[in-house]
Structure formats: structure tokens, C-alpha cells
Amino acid sequence: MVFSDRFEAGELLAQKLSKYANDPDTIVIALPRGGVPVAYVIAKQLGLPLDIFFVKKIPSPYNPEAAIGAISENGLEFINERVVMMLNVSRHYIDEQAQKIMEGIKQKRALYQRPRKSIVGKRVILVDDGVATGASMYLAAKALKEEGAKEVIIAVPVAPPDSIAMLKEVADEVIVLDIPADFMAVGQYYRDFHQLDDKEVVELLENTP
């Protein structure tokens, strides 16, 4: 399955989530930035509030594109202990990076002018534009559960089979439109997969409750 863009993916996911329409105990939460357009359509079509939740990777000291872990905006941390041991990464480095990441998240939250909504006792529909390794989505679901969400439903357009198995360990339900066995990258399943800028995200958030 190839989606024309993130908005079309959101429309198709909204159909799968229609039973939650106008439910006062349900909130849609996107992982920025790519998850925002997908979640925006879901929230609009189902009459649900929209929020964002930041999870950022902790980069390897030897390759900034590679992750040795991740941290959520409410401070929950995931560390790939095997990789950390292999690379001999110090705890000092991890703590230093985590502090930088948290400062960056605070700046983004202020830029988007989106104070966090309470999710205590709520059903959360957690959305991204796709899943690769699943580490960020796994950490986000776990963090929101620990924060008091009564239920977390992960909804994504595309994900590989092994990542889905991992996500099912932490989510109450995982909804995926396409599960390709030959998955390589999320972008290959979109005709338009441009990198969103902050302006696009702000505009979408301003148009939702």
C-alpha cells in the first residue's frame, strides 16, 4: 500500500477508529513532527481533541544518526544497554544528552504554543506517520501509561511485523493499515513524504481544539 500523503493515511486510520468518535474520554496524541498531519485528520474526523507528545532519540557519540536510546518529554528513558556496552558509552554522556534533549523539547513545546492536556483516566490514540524500529512509539506508549492513561491505542499507517510485536507488549491495541514483510523505510510507502517544518505543525495545531 502506498499513501498519497500523511492526510490520506489519517483518513484511512480514522475509518478504523470510528467507534471512538466524539468520545469525551478519548484524546488523539501525535508524535511530532511527522505524526501531526495524520493525527490532525483523525482528530478532525472523529471530533476528538489533539495533543502532541515528544520522544527524542539519544544519539550515539560516534554517529549522530544512530540512536543508543530515547527519552520522553515526561522524563522516561529507554537505553539500549547492549549498544551502550558495545560502544562503551559513559553514563555522563547519556545524562548530558538527556538534559540537552529535554531543553530542546521545552523550546518546541513553547514554539508550538500547546500546553499539555491531562491524559489521566483517558484513552489515548497514539499516532505517527509510520514505525520503523518502534523504539520511540514504544517509549511514548509506556510513558503515557505511567502518566495515567487508562488505555493506549497505537495507530500508524505502516510498520514492519517485528516492531508490531514489540508494540503489542505495551499498548492495549495496535492498529496498522499495512504490514509489509519487506519493509525498509517509512518513506517508501508515501508518494509525498516531505519533512514537515515547524510552521506546518503550528498551523495544524491551531486548527484543532
Image (spheres, rainbow, N blue to C red):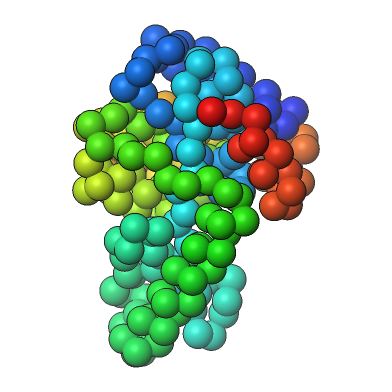
Residue located at (77% from left, 38% from top): 192
Percent x, y for residue 81? 29, 74
Residue 1 versus residue 160 in the image, above or below? above
Whether residue 118 appears in this view of the structure is yes
Residue located at (38% from left, 59% from top): 72
| Location of residue 158 (image quadrant) | top right
Residue 13 versus residue 99 in the image, above or below? above
Viewer-proximal residue, 112 or 163?
112
Percent x, y for residue 163? 40, 45
Residue 67 versus residue 183 in the image, above or below? below
Percent x, y for residue 173? 31, 28
Q: Is residue 131 left or right of residue 197?
A: left
Residue located at (60% from left, 50% from top): 112
Percent x, y for residue 152? 31, 34
Q: Is residue 121 left or right of residue 13?
A: left
| Location of residue 166 (image quadrant) | top left
Viewer-proximal residue, 143 or 22?
22
Whether residue 86 appears in this view of the structure is no
The quadrant of the picture occupied by the C terminus is top right
Report how many numbered discs are placed on residues in the image.
Answer: 0
Residue located at (47% from left, 21% from top): 48
The quadrant of the picture occupied by the N terminus is top right
